[in-house]
Amino acid sequence: MAMMPDVLCPGCRGKNVGKVGTGQFYCWDCYIEFQVSARGTRLYRVESDGELSRIERLEGLGHEVVS
Ligand SMILES: [Zn+2]
């Protein structure tokens, strides 16, 4: 098994994150999907119908952004 750095959720900084694809992860606490690439992290909200919508800011997630 390849060593992999822990991926933290950009929303809650938690580790309750599952991998859903190449460079794609899902946070079980925030119910958001995020994509990590060299260009940065993109966040997506998973809608009730399964569609992904881009989240431009973390506001509205119910989490404070801790830096
Ligand atoms: Zn989270």
Image (tube, helix red, strand yellow):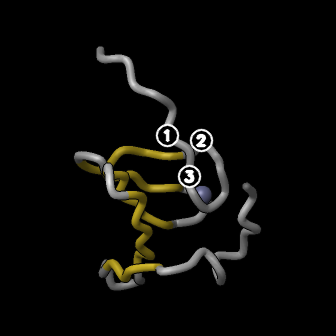
User: Which of the marked residues, 1 or 2, is nearer the chain's N terminus?
Assistant: 1
| Label 3 beta carbon less than 8 Å to ligand 1 | yes
Category of crowding for the residue at label 2, using alpha-carbon neighbours closer than 10 angstroms: few (below 14), some (14–19), many (at least 20): some
For mark 1, give the secondary structure: loop
For mark 3, give the secondary structure: loop
**Alpha-carbon span between mark 1 and mark 2:** 7 Å
Q: Residue at 32% x, 49% y: name it.
A: 38
Q: Name the kind of residue labelled 1 in the image.
A: Val
* Picture layout, residue 7 above or below residue 61: above
Quadrant placement of the C terminus? bottom right
* Picture layout, residue 30 above or below residue 9: below
Farthest residue toward the front? 39
Judging depth in this view, the residue of 46 and 65 nearest the camera is 65
The percent coordinates of residue 63 (x first, y second) are: 72, 69
Question: Do the residues under discs 3 and 2 have CB atoms within 8 angstroms?
Answer: yes
The percent coordinates of residue 20 (x first, y second) are: 30, 50
Question: Do the residues under discs 3 and 1 have CB atoms within 8 angstroms?
Answer: yes
User: Which of the marked residues, 3 or 2, is nearer the chain's N terminus?
Assistant: 3
